[in-house]
Image (tube, rainbow, N blue to C red):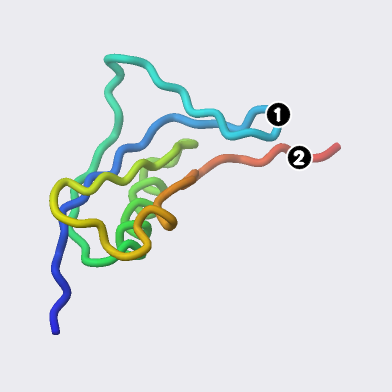
């Protein structure tokens, strides 16, 4: 049985690590990188967001939004706290 494809949009927000916490900066009117795609499962959505973030190359927080329809199983758990390209501080 074929899985139903759903429309998703991923948005990358600038983020960095500050004093051991992830900090995401929001500026109103700021142009943010976005990408739309179609996948069937939450794992595929996370993989697509990871590929887009690595292509972007800067520290970011990925926010995945379902454009229409029902969320796939495990979507909320798998799609929160998606931080990419953040460099950890070096212990001296």
Q: Residue at x 30, y 58 (%)?
A: 45
**Element under disc 2:** loop
Residue at horizontal 40 percent and vertical 52 percent from the top: 79
The reply to whether the C-beta atoms of the residues labelled 2 and 1 are less than 8 Å apart is no
Closer to viewer: mark 2 or mark 1: 1
Distance CA(mark 2)–CA(mark 1):
12 Å
Is residue 68 or residue 61 the one in the foreground? 68
Compared with residue 4, is residue 20 higher up or lower down, i.e. above or below? Answer: above
Q: Residue placed at 32% from the left, 62% from the top?
A: 42
- Horizontal relation, residue 41 to residue 23: left or right: left
Q: Is residue 1 above or below residue 30?
A: below
- First-in-chain label (2 vs 1): 1
Q: What percent of the width, then of the height, locates residue 38?
A: 17, 58
Q: Which residue is found at the position 66% from the left and 41% from the top?
A: 88
Image quadrant where residue 41 sits = bottom left
40 over 71 or under it: above or below: below
Q: Which residue is mark 2?
A: 90
Badge 1, how many Cα within 10 Å: few under 14, some, many 20+? few
- Secondary structure category for the residue under label 1: loop
Query: Mark 1 = which residue?
Result: 19
Tell me if 18 is positioned left or right of 76 in this view: right
Specify the farthest residue to the top: 28
Residue 85 sits above or below residue 78 on the image: above
The quarter of the rendered structure image containing the C terminus is: top right
Q: Residue 33, percent across and down?
A: 29, 34
Give the farthest residue toward the bottom: 1
Residue 68 lies, in percent from the top left, at 13, 49
């Amino acid at each position: 049985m074929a899985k139903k494809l759903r429309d998703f949009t991923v948005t990358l927000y600038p983020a960095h690590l500050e004093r051991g916490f992830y900090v995401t900066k929001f500026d109103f009117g700021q142009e943010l990188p976005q990408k739309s795609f179609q996948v069937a499962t939450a794992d595929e959505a996370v993989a697509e967001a990871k590929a887009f973030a690595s292509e972007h190359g800067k520290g970011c927080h990925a926010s995945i939004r379902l454009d229409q329809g029902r969320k796939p199983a495990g979507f909320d758990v798998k799609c929160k706290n998606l931080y990419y390209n953040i460099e950890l501080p070096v212990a001296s």
